[in-house]
């Protein structure tokens, strides 16, 4: 196994570089998935039938809170990777924990938002608009949930094994995934919530 010590730890072996390239390809497939969900939503968003419209159910305050939490978590995962590259184990774990707590806060608001919609009679079966909305937001929320579990597993590994080519590689790939979820949320914020409130 050839090791290049001039590269960051997560890139030092050819296998690690290939894993990162492979993950970028995976994210390409994820982009296709979310692009399809956005296309469906943008086709159906005005087809509310007898159900509520976007303007009737969307509220800006929780959406701004979700946006703040998720974008802040993108910053903290960047700090975690930076700390990892400096070989600082405790700050890395602290920034990971902050990232995951912010992600959990985001998810809590989203679950409460879904609960509110359903309580007001806006369900998956109410209209084409609500079906496409729930599928889009639910898919993103499921990805965040997976990210929380994945992040916990990486924290456990770093705590047990410290930094090596494998834990650094996994940590960096996780950060790519988390940044991707934040980018998707920016599109959701812009093309779902802002568009719906106009």
Image: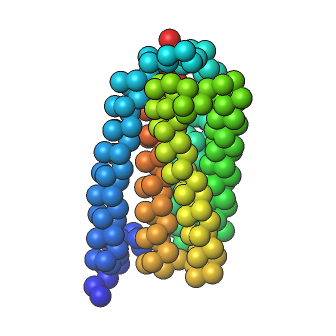
Q: Nearer the viewer, residue 69 or 87?
A: 69
Residue sitting at the far top: 198
Q: Quadrant of residue 70?
A: top right
Q: Residue at x 44, y 22 (%)?
A: 45
Q: Position of residue 126 (x, y in %)?
A: 55, 26
Q: Position of residue 47 (x, y in %)?
A: 44, 18
**Numbered label tally:** 0
> Which quadrant, please, contains the N terminus?
bottom left
Q: Residue at x 63, y 55 (%)?
A: 100
Q: Nearer the viewer, residue 77 or 153?
A: 153
Can the viewer see residue 18 in this picture? Answer: yes
Position of 77 relative to 140 (above/below): below
Q: Quadrant of residue 109?
A: top right
Q: Nearer the viewer, residue 88 or 156?
A: 156
Q: Position of residue 21 (x, y in %)?
A: 29, 63
Q: Residue at x 43, y 78 (%)?
A: 165
Q: Position of residue 64 (x, y in %)?
A: 62, 28
Can the viewer see residue 113 in this picture? Answer: no
Position of 151 relative to 43 (above/below): below
Position of 105 compared to 183: left or right?
right
Q: Nearer the viewer, residue 92 or 32?
A: 32
């Amino acid at each position: 196994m050839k090791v290049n010590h001039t590269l960051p730890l997560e890139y030092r072996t050819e296998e690690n570089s290939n894993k990162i390239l492979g993950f970028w390809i995976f994210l390409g497939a994820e982009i296709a998935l979310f692009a399809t969900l956005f296309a469906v939503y943008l086709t159906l968003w005005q087809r509310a039938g007898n159900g509520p419209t976007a303007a009737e159910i969307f509220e800006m305050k929780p959406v701004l809170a979700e946006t703040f939490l998720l974008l802040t978590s993108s910053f903290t995962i960047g700090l975690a990777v930076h700390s990892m590259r400096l070989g600082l184990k405790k700050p890395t774990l602290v920034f990971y924990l902050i990232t995951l707590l912010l992600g959990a806060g985001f998810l809590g608001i989203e679950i409460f938002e879904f609960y509110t919609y359903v309580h007001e009679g806006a369900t998956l079966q109410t209209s084409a608009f609500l079906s496409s909305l729930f599928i889009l937001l639910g898919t993103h929320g499921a990805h965040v949930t997976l990210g929380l579990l994945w992040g916990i597993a990486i924290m456990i590994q770093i705590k047990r094994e410290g930094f090596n080519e494998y834990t650094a590689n996994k940590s960096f790939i996780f950060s790519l995934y988390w940044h991707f979820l934040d980018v998707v949320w920016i599109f959701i914020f812009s093309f779902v919530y802002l568009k719906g409130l106009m």
